[in-house]
Image: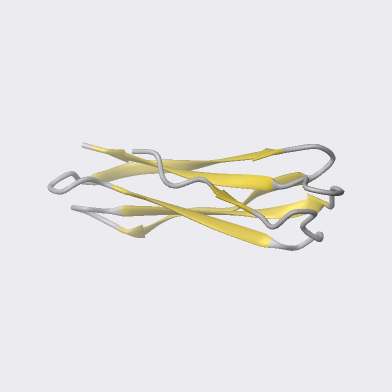
Amino acid sequence: MTGTAVASSAHAAVGVTATSTATCTAGKVLVAGGARVTFTGAERGSVLESYPSTAGANGVWTASGIAIVAGSGGDTFTVTAYAYCA
């Protein structure tokens, strides 16, 4: 299950965070999860946290990213959470 991709504000300062969640569909159990951070222009981001915020049936995986290099103009970083459900 892919969570909603959440983008930072444009030209996010170092230390700014963004958080995404991915939720298992009804009746599915959270098995594992992960995160991906992408960026545009000179902006750079990294995974800050990636963890199960709700375990078991209808589980939720939460992922946070953090800006580690500020870009310019409309540069952003985007974090996406992934939940692996069975």
Q: Residue furthest left?
A: 27
Q: Residue at x 81, y 59 (%)?
A: 14
Quarter where residue 43 is shown: top right
Q: Is residue 55 above or below residue 27?
A: below
In the displayed structure, does residue 58 sit left or right of residue 84? left
Which residue is located at x 84 percent, y 52 percent? 70
Where is residue 6? Give x, y as percent: 55, 51
Give 59 or 11, whichever is nearer the viewer.
11
Q: How many marks?
A: 0
Q: Residue at x 15, y 48 (%)?
A: 26
User: Does residue 36 appear left or right of residue 38 in this picture?
Assistant: left
In the image, what residue occupies the spot 21% across and 53% down? 58
List x then y, in percent, for residue 36.
56, 39
- Across and down, in percent, residue 27 comes to 12, 47
Q: Position of residue 81 (x, y in %)?
A: 47, 45
Horizontal side of residue 62 vs 1, given as left or right: right
Colour theme: secondary structure
For residue 54, what is the image quadrant?
Answer: bottom left
